[in-house]
Image (spheres, rainbow, N blue to C red):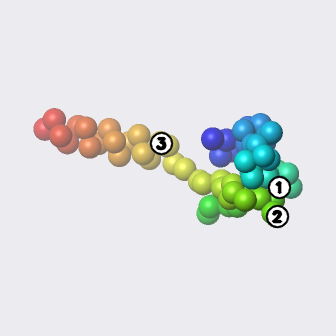
Amino acid sequence: MGEKSDIVRGLVCEGLGHLGILLDAQKNELGATSAVTEIQAAGSAVKILIIPTNEELEIANQTKDVIEERV
């Protein structure tokens, strides 16, 4: 969730420190690169990742698969 929104990522992780989920606010604000980006704080028991996605491509691929199955 929140690949393109530091606010959403921050809200999702808020209050989860008791589960070992500690977000690094500065890394979170910098956001994603073209690769998987780690944004957890030092000492976090859990990795927090921004994973780039391409929903449009996935929708196109699945649509193509459905059309090909019907032909």
Amino acid on which disc 2 is placed:
Ala
The residue indicated by pointer 2 is: 42
Q: Which mark is residue 56?
A: 3
> Do we see residue 64 in this rendering?
yes
Q: CA distance from mark 2 to mark 1?
A: 8 Å
Label 2 or label 3, whichever comes before in sequence order: 2
Q: Position of residue 52 (x, y in %)?
A: 59, 53
Density class for disc 3 (Cα within 10 Å; few <14, some 14-19, many ≥20) is: few
Q: Residue drawn at (34%, 42%), measured in percent from left and top?
A: 62
Of 64 and 22, which appears nearest the observer? 22
Q: Is residue 45 left or right of residue 36?
A: right
> Do we see residue 7 in this rendering?
no
Q: Residue drawn at (75%, 52%), measured in percent from left and top?
A: 20
The residue indicated by pointer 1 is: 24
Q: CA distance from mark 1 to mark 3?
A: 29 Å
Q: Secondary structure at mark 3?
A: helix
Q: Position of residue 27 (x, y in %)?
A: 81, 57
Q: How many marks?
A: 3
Of 55 and 14, which appears nearest the observer? 14
The residue furthest right is 26
Q: Residue drawn at (76%, 43%), measured in percent from left and top?
A: 16
Q: Residue drawn at (69%, 57%), measured in percent from left and top?
A: 46
Q: Secondary structure at mark 2?
A: loop
Label 2 or label 1, whichever comes before in sequence order: 1
Q: Is residue 71 left or right of residue 3?
A: left
